[in-house]
Structure formats: C-alpha cells, structure tokens
Image (cartoon, grey):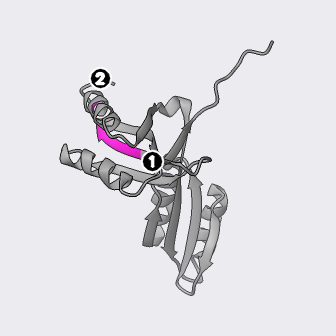
Amino acid sequence: MSAMEPHLTTLSVLVENQPGVLARVAGLIARRGYNIESLAVGPTDDPGFSRMTLVVDQTQTHVEQIVKQLYKLINVIKIIELDPTDSIERELLLVRVACTAETRFQVLELAEIFEAKVADVGAESVALELSGPPSRLNDLLELVEQHGIKEVARTGRIGLERARKRAAI
C-alpha cells in the first residue's frame, strides 16, 4: 500500500479526561475536511485520562498530518497508530433480524455459528449481540441480511497494541 492510497487507519489517542476534549478533537479533524469513520471514547485505568479510538479513511500523508495537528491540542497526551497486524481491535454489534416461526431456527443457528448472544426475542424478530473484529461483524451481517435486518447498532472500534513478545531466558 502506498502513502497516496486511502486506507482505514486506527488511532489510539490518550487524552486528559476534561470537558470539551472530544469536541476539540472532532472539530480539529472536521475543520481540515477529514471524516471520522468510527469514534469510541472511554475512561482508562487512570480516572484523569480517557482513550479515544478514531478510525479515518485517509492516505498515510493525511494521517501523519492529523497526528501532528492532534499533538498541538494541549489535552492530547499520546497517539499511537495501531497496526492491524500488531494490535487487537474489537467492536460490538447489536442487530435485530426479522424472522418468522419457520425461519427463527435458521437465525439462531447463525448466532450459534458466530457465537453471538441472543439479546432479545420477539414474535417477529431476534436481536443478536456479537463482539469481535470488525470483519467478523460484517460477515454475520452479510449472512443475516437474507432474513431482513430491522435495526443495526454498532459501537465504534476500540483497540490496543498487542503485548510485546519476549524471548524466554
């Protein structure tokens, strides 16, 4: 992949847990004409900090520019570009799938194959919950689409770098 080809990039941004930080980060990116594909924010083990996980679809040159601009914000502590081969990335999916009494078994069988949890059962639908890599969620959505998707809710992507492997001594 060249630096001039747009690609999904996940940025893990450690910020001070202060009011307005999310608005400043999102505003900075929007003002420069970039779109945030996914955004998740949550506290860390230290209540003074939050972790923002941003996914952008940009060239490497633009990603580097975004990182430089983010570092200019006083509340930004650290930014890591997560390498997909060297990180753990997850999302949560809730999907309400249309089903009849006759097709309910097929939907439940798909849930079992994907190890999805049944979150709710109604007369005309089943709601499934699945967490995992974004590609796994996409695969489930593709397969349940034939039954009819009534609703979808997806969290933003979150991620951490993998633990460094150490040679045994």
Residue 140 image point, x, y percent: 52, 57
Q: Which residues are magenta?
A: 54-59
Residue 115 forms part of the magenta stretch: no
> What residue is drawn where x is 44% and y is 41%?
13
> What residue is drawn where x is 52% and y is 61%?
93
Q: Rounded to the nearest whole Å, what is the CA distance between mark 2 and mark 1?
A: 26 Å
Q: Nearer the viewer, residue 135 or 11?
A: 11
In-image side of 140 versus 13 (left or right): right
Quarter of the image for the N terminus: give it. top left
Toward which corner of the image does residue 3 lie, by quadrant?
A: top left
Element class at badge 1: strand
The residue that disc 2 covers is 2
Q: Which mark is residue 12?
A: none
Toward which corner of the image does residue 7 lie, by quadrant?
A: top left
SS assignment for the magenta stretch, majority: strand
The residue that disc 1 covers is 52
Q: Which callout, 2 or 1, points to the residue nearer the camera?
A: 1
Q: Nearer the viewer, residue 59 or 123?
A: 59
Q: Is residue 145 visible?
A: no
Residue 57 forms part of the magenta stretch: yes
